[in-house]
Amino acid sequence: MNTSRSEQLYKTACGFMPGGVNSPVRACKAVGTVPLFIDHAKGSRIWDENGNEFIDYVCSWGPNILGHCCEPVINAVKAACDKGLTFGACHKGEITLAELIKKHFPSMEMLRLVNSGTEAVMSAIRAARGYTGRDKIIKFEGCYHGHSDGLLVKAGSGLMTQAIPSGAGVTEGCTKDTLLAKYNDTASVEKLFEEYGSEIAALIVEPCAANMGVVPPEKGFLEFLREITKKHGTVLIFDEVITGFRLSDGGASKYFGVIPDMTTLGKIVGGGMPLACYGGKLEIMQCVAPLGSVYQAGTLSGNPCAVAAGIETIRQIESIPNFYEELDRKSAMIENAIREKGLNVNRCGSLMTVFFNDERVKSYDEARACNTESYGRYYRHMLQSGIYTAPSQFEAMFVSYAHSDEDIAKTIEAIESYR
């Protein structure tokens, strides 16, 4: 496969951007390749600068659940652009999107649009602290909630890929109120509440972890978190930046049947453009300015072009019969092929990860123990076979509605030929 254009562009990019990239995992260091520079995409496919064609299972890390360049979404964005790229002021599209989100996430009684998942999580935690008057938060090892200082403690995603235990430049003062628990380990949570219960403002969790690879919650784990946070007056925050509108039209909350106090959404809710949101119980959100004293603002929040993409994406999902059943069917076909090959895989809906170890991964420590060199060989084999997957052992594979049975068959063929 000729990748000369990507190699040339990467060399040039390294002179302008740290590592030649604008997000660390794109550097592909963990899989021993030079990053591909993408020229265009359509449906389930992407094409690089050399014209190589791939079936794409990264899907821009999740938002392209309808596939690339979904025509109704593109048309909605073009129409919005014709009216102006940004106003820095209110517009009726914000109300329409908020209504759609609340329709599917009724626990978000009030919400605020922002620009990224990092911003949504940061703002939700600030609101929880303002509401409770407490300082401490609990997060879980291997769960990634964006790159804000207080959450870069044993985070997943790129921090695992780059073997960085926590980010340099983050002071002890920023993380002194962040308590660490072990995902899928109720005892570790109980211990923290026994010691700090009256001081804990919020517990934040990916209801299905997807940043140490896909690690679903063990039976009863989310129900336990709901019960113990309620007992201690702690705000339970579901970080559904990845799982929102991905596992179901009501996200992981609906999928698992557990209702949090607050939710953060991103990825799909922006339809592939920079947009996210946070929201929850009315009494919590009424603490946010201008109603309350918890300050959060953003010039581009509710950007009309991103809002248009989000509205149309959700409307498309609503209009397609058996949308999530079809995603699940396609995903199960790939999962079964991986298992039949003798490889280890975790799947939750249309999210999955191939793990190179001998046992089912259900914790951060078990994810870290995986053989990343073997994953790199697998990644390179799939790439040479025309299949574009995550360039990291610790990321998810995303199946979109645009993936055809022909795409799935070709993917299975690539899996079966792996040595």
Image (spheres, grey):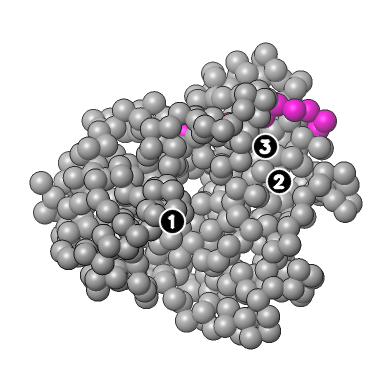
Q: Is residue 300 visible?
A: yes
Q: Which is more toward the observer, 236 or 321?
A: 236
Q: Earlier in the sequence, mark 1 or mark 2?
A: 1
* Mark 2–mark 3 CB contact (< 8 Å): no
Q: Which is more toward the observer, 170 or 233?
A: 170
The answer to whether residue 221 is above or below residue 147 is above
Q: Which mark is residue 123?
A: 2
Q: Amino acid at mark 3?
A: Leu
Q: Amino acid at mark 2?
A: Ser
SS for dot 3: strand
The answer to whether residue 175 is above or below residue 413 is above
Residue 291 colored magenta?
Answer: no
**What residue appears at the point 26 percent right and 45 percent down from the top-left corner?**
31
- Residue that numbered label 3 is attached to: 236
Where residue 27 sits: x, y (%)? 35, 50
**What residue appears at the point 55 percent right and 24 percent down from the top-left corner?**
181
Q: Is residue 217 visible?
A: no
**What residue appears at the point 60 percent right and 15 percent down from the top-left corner?**
191
Q: Which mark is residue 378?
A: none
Mark 1 residue crowding within 10 angstroms, few (<14) / some (14–19) / many (20+): few
Q: For the residues carrying marks 2 and 3, which lies nearer the camera in this image?
A: 2
Q: Quadrant of residue 206?
A: top right
Residue stretch rendered in magenta on the structure: 132-142
The residues bearing labels 2 and 3 have C-alpha atoms spaced at a distance of 14 Å
Q: In the displayed structure, does residue 359 sit left or right of residue 93?
A: left
Q: Amino acid at mark 1?
A: Phe
**What residue appears at the point 66 percent right and 29 percent down from the top-left corner?**
174
Q: Earlier in the sequence, mark 2 or mark 3?
A: 2
SS for dot 1: loop
Q: Which mark is residue 16?
A: 1
